[in-house]
Image (cartoon, grey):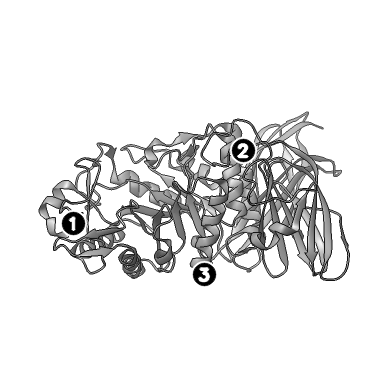
Amino acid sequence: MIQHLNITDFHFDRSFYVPQEPVMLSIHIVSQVEQSVSAKIKASIMHLGDTIDQLEKTISLSGGEQDFEVSYMPPPDVPRGYGVDLCVETVKGEILECISTGFDVLNNWTQNPRYGFLTDFFPGRSNFNETTDSLVRYHINGLQFYDWMYRHEQFLTEEEPYIDLLGRNLSRVTVEKLVGAVHEKSIAAMPYTAIYAASTPFFEEHPDWALYQANGKPYLLGKNFLVYMDPRPDSPWVNYLLSQFATVLQEIDFDGIHLDQYGDPKEAYDSKGNKFSLASPLAETINATKDLVLQYRINGAVVFNAVTNWPIETVSKSNQDFIYIEVWSPYTWFDDLHKLITQAQDLSNGKPVILAAYIDPERENNVRLVDATIFASGGGHIELGEINGMLSDPYFPKYGTISPELSETLRRYYDFAVRYQDAIGPRTADGTGAYLNRILINGAYPSPSQLTDKVWPIVRETDRLTAINLINLRGIKSPEWAREVKDPPTKIEQAIVRISEVNRDVNRIWFASPDRDSISLQPIDFTLSGETGGRTLICKVPYLEYWDLIIIEWE
């Protein structure tokens, strides 16, 4: 007889899967039984609201802690997100415990990047498996190795260990072991580099390679820390930098290059006094970097940091694999996060978008609302890394630590975004503007001019689906995503959603939320009334805490 049973943990063996690769889900069960007893694991494999397969496995419970695995070969469709609804039952069919999660099948991680970070490369580090296991739980499939190098202009050194420019004691052995460890989980390793930064001694050897101000002084970052170099693709600096990239890719098994910049200057002078804009040269150097990376990695990736969304018009059209934007003022409102993502998607012809928006992990309400906004907008958020680490500062070694409660919440949010990516992910299109004046929530229009204390719909669309994300800003006093939200949003019971001017027939409507233990889609009733072309669709969602999802499947 089974007296007690809990599924205390579950995780996949990889961050994502490629076609024809089996999926392995491990579950950790704690049970109390009078004697060894049989039970069953039943799992439904879902694509949105449809069951595409069902699995059943008989297990033997002996009491205490036990681990079990469920394997599955997904269909060849790619890219695609899937759900798993798994229950442990008695042999008579009594449900003991259930979980719901998600995974995806991609040709390459850059099709739906979940970007994280590593920054602790000290000698003797040994917790590689613990680190990668923690990241896989959030489906992190790419990692920025931040400040791993010896110098900004000389990445590798014969010293082991070595001291970086800020005095940190680092180890190439640790870097290489981490690269190998993350690869075992299908996580890409991307080395941080700066597109135009060099140390002061290097500048003194090459003063004609630098960027200059109108007064003839070089551009500096910090006092005697870094000097800006000329990033034009035909400059001696860029030729030198590309040779450094080649050396790194030859000697360490990185998966591409992550390029950083500092946002200013936007115009500068070369050593001969010629003034030029940096916008186009930065894009051209991205392309040159991509050409070089492909010489060493068939699927090598290049990513560039558009600091404060600059120069997004040029770099969005470059050959980088996805758009990466570090968010600073004037992009301070929740709505700005949505606008940054959708603008970049439009400019880049649909490339995935990652935002770097730094939040203190103690501000858990902010974390939930920001992630809800970003994920609902089809974007990703670089925030998680190391073990329970969260980026709270642009200098990644200053990362904070998430609480166990926030960890569980974020696992559901990342599961949710992965599972429903075919309705709200980077391959869908923004439809928010077309719906804003057509949606009533509990009798109120979500006016764009109302910045706080509202329910905000973010709409994503495909040919047959319309996904309406409800972001709950009721009771939120400030529209600024980084300002502390001390209290959670005002919870809403049974929100009634009315959509006017509906000119298509509806097949089904589903509801789901990452704010409850089960993230499975549930069918909900609806009515569609009025004249063709001007009909009103009405449905009711059972609750709204932070983030709800309504998926409409059209006939």
* Element under disc 3: loop
On the image, the x and y values in percent for residue 345 come to 53, 63
Question: Pointers 1 and 2 in contact (CB under 8 A)?
Answer: no
Disc nearer the start of the sequence (1/2)? 1
Q: Tell me which label, 2 or 3, sits earlier in the chain.
A: 3
Query: Looking at the picture, which amino acid does disc 2 mark?
Result: Glu
Q: Which residue is mark 1?
A: 210
Number of other residues with Cα within 10 Å of mark 2, as a class: few under 14, some 14 to 19, many 20 or more: some
As rendered, which of 45 and 341 lies closer to the eye? 341
Q: Which dot, 1 or 2, sits closer to the camera?
A: 1
Q: Is residue 249 visible?
A: yes
- In this rendered view, identify the residue nearer to me: 533 or 427: 533
Label for residue 349? 3
- The residue pinned by badge 2 equals 408
Residue occupying the point 69% across, 54% down: 83
- In terms of depth relative to the viewer, which is nearer, 367 or 16? 367
Which residue occupies the foreground of this view, 283 or 173? 283
Q: Amino acid at mark 3?
A: Asn
Q: Is residue 320 visible?
A: no
Q: CA distance from mark 1 to mark 2?
A: 48 Å
Q: Nearer the viewer, mark 2 or mark 3?
A: 3
Instruction: Left or right? Give the position of 108 relative to 448.
Output: left
| SS of the residue under disc 2 | helix
The x and y percentages for residue 437 are: 71, 58
Q: Mark 3, residues whose alpha carbon is within 10 Å: few (<14), some, or many (≥20)?
A: few
Instruction: Give residue 160's position: percent from left, percent from top.
Output: 23, 43
